[in-house]
Image (cartoon, rainbow, N blue to C red):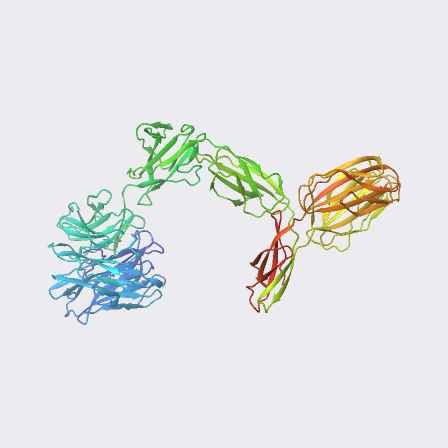
Amino acid sequence: MSDSVATTTATDPLRYPAGTRIDRDLLTGYLWTMVPGTTANTYDLYRSTNEGVAWSLITSLTRANVSEMGSIFIGNQNWLHWCYRTNETSQDRIYYRRFRFDTFTWEAEVALSTPANGGVAGSAYTGLDLVVAVGNGGTEYVAVAVGTIVGANQGVTILGAYTLYNGGTYASDPLFTGYRQWLFTGSGHTTPSIDLEHNADGKTSANGNLWVAFGRTGAYVAKLAWNGNGWTGPTTPVTLTTGISARDYMPGRWDGTRFCVAVPSGSTVVLYERDRSNTTTVMNTSGVHPQGTIRSLTLGYNAGSGDARVFAVGTTINDLYYVDFIRATGTWSGWTAVSTDDIVGTNVDNFSVRRSTVQNARYSVAHARSGAPQIQHTLLTLTYAPLVPTWNLTGAAYSNGGGADVTSAIVLDWDFHDPDPTDTQSAYALSRQIGAGALNYWRASDSSWQVAEVQNTSGTTGVTIPTVWAADGNTVTFKVKTWDSTSTASAYSAALVVIASTAVNPTITAPAATIATDTVTVTWTVAEQTAFRVTLELVGVQVYDSGWIQSTALTWTVPTHLDNAVSYTAKLQTRNNEGLAGTIQSAAFTVAFAAPRVPTLTASPAPALGYISVAVNNPDRAFVAVGTAASANNASVVPGLPAGMTPDVLQLLVCVAAIRNSGTGTVNTIAGWTSLVNFGNVRAFAKLLVTGDTAPTVAFTGGVAGADTSAQIAGFLGFTTAVHGAGGTVLNGSAQNIATPAATITLDSTLVLAIGWKQSITTGATPPAGFTEIFDINAAAGSGQALTVAYQIQNAATSIGTSSFTMAGGVSAISRGIIVPLVGAPDVTSNDIYRREAGDTSTGIRVATAVANDGSGNDFRARSGTAYEYRILARGANGTSTYGAWTP
């Protein structure tokens, strides 16, 4: 009878058979154990925070009349559970109680059963064990297996309770239906064992099934199925064996795959295993215990390997030994002493082992000892072979089955694995096979390949193979094995297959240096490609990553809105036919686009019809007004701003200025204005009107007495300061009219300015065909000059041919002709309408889409009595878009 920790006194007045007395909590990983106290009627709960090296007394519970301690169990709700038997008022009473780790206090005990014992303790109930399952809402279902004596029969009874997460425990035999008691002829003390059909952690069960092992002169197993509200027991249990020497305890444990029962047979142990369906039995018999006939034993298991470990005390001395059934080989290890300290107490079952090695790959064993605390704890580290190493491709420049650059060294990295997380690698062997050729093995001492396996002493889990490590096009298979700190070897790893390859780099063909849209499409050429990756950076910070896309396509549109007047870098990387990535290629570009004019709206509720109608206003591109002209004799001038304009993102001001003495006089730069064209003594500027703008001062350089100076400003709606292409200029010899140059126009929505200057006053000007005059200045403050400007707005791009201003009056003189095309706002192709509740700061929801230019949409989902705001998203023909303001 094992799995217990006893008192320090030699008399050992109580029995402490069966049930685990040592367990680990899930929150902190601390070990806990329960032992009888040195003071009568006390039971001490100890905790270890350093794997059992030292123990601290957490609490002492006083409880008189305890005849037998059951096990402790820490479930996955992280509470500690305990059961025990008392002898009171001629009854064998079974109690359960819970210890709270949050308050370090015991809850009240709950009586599960109280049969009469005729005043003889243990004549109705004997040993006991418990397990806890968790149901919905955190309710814990407690199952306690109790050794039972009824007349000339003995066996097991299953008792039940449930406990609420935040407190409250209730006995509940109705948790069990079918059968929960099985008896056979016989008498004497017996202790059953009970376990959950868990997932190998000892605590978590997907199906809630229970397994029970019991018997004294026979070994029996019962499986109880979870039925959703409790458990259903079978009519009869499975008989494993009969006719054995009387035993107090034959431990049974579910190891995550099977139910194992350890039954002593003289000086050996027979391990009986029932499969999950409880239909077949497998038996394995250990070697002979070195200390004679087995008197007491218990059972644990390794959750990683499924190996079983039996702990047992023989008849010669009270030393505890263990033996392992190694599942991988189907063999038993030799018996090994846990400690040379005899177990203290009259019962040699006063020891306990934590059910499994699911944590830390170590067995925690505790048994009675002298001194304080009353626990002799031994931590047994597993000494099994390392697990198979796995390849670590994190950060690798290749993938398993893909290409690797044969012109560079290849880095092979792996992870060492061992059931004991504290174990380390002491050596490795690395094999290489090229195609179907012979195996070779890496020798680290001279960086060469050998025909026989080489054990390289190293704790480093990686190696760099220098170039050239294979011929271009070879398929190379690498495998690795490791040795642990005890020089025990693992098996070889799975294959790492790489193809020796040479990178193929693409050539980016787009974008160009400047793009006029708010999205970018990357195009390229490349000799071979199986995948590509496109990224986008803004000031060195990545703002988009397509990830690797398996495709042979040579174009990719980045699904990210680009900010205007901002420079980006598109980066491209491709993989060749072997999957080897080439060098990253880059293309820097600047965004310069014209977005649609800012739309406005009018919202009109229609309560009777159940909707709100939203009318969209998309402003047109247009000439607005011209300001007052200013002229002087070799002096600065201040032309007036056009009337009727308000600050707006596309309210464009164009200022044209000239000085008479061509060849020596020039127009100075105007602060805050963009120079559109600077052609000798004639110059044009532009700016977008903003709040606070005032009439500019236009200054000149190189003038002489009699040199007339002139300037005038015109206003336009829906255009930018960006010049489309180079436009055109021409210096004309002496003539009556002013010849103008040709210009190629390729963008729709363009404002084309025609500018004419003549070194003589005239009586009027007629602009080139298709242009509308804006102003005509004839300055006579000095020797006289004429300055005339006309425009045309092109919805569709139309190139300009050579033409002329027809000048009336005056005399023949030299002149200059200029064509300046300016980028305008694109046509609106459609509008989306968005809505939000007034005061909400979110982006809102779209309630209408594809609304026509200057059209309207109806919001049928608006709720009565709710204040809303709307805004418009205008979509331009050039792929750009503009939001309007939120408007009630």
565 left or right, relative to 490: right
Q: Position of residue 470 (x, y in %)?
A: 40, 28
Answer above or below: position of 118 versus 69. below
Q: Is residue 39 visible?
A: no
Where is residue 191, by image quadrant? bottom left
Q: Position of residue 66 (x, y in %)?
A: 22, 65
Task: Tell me the quadrant of the picture where the C terminus can be found.
Answer: bottom right
Answer above or below: position of 349 versus 476. below
Q: Position of residue 549 (x, y in %)?
A: 47, 42
806 left or right, relative to 543: right
Q: Position of residue 163 (x, y in %)?
A: 31, 65
List the single residue furthest toward the bottom.
89
Q: Which residue is pictured at 28% across the width and 41% down the height? A: 385
Foreground residue among 831 and 248: 831
Task: Tell me the quadrant of the picture where the N terminus can be found.
Answer: bottom left
Q: Is residue 549 visible?
A: yes
Q: Which residue is pictured at 68% across the width and 54% down the height? A: 619
728 left or right, relative to 72: right
Where is residue 220, by image quadrant? bottom left
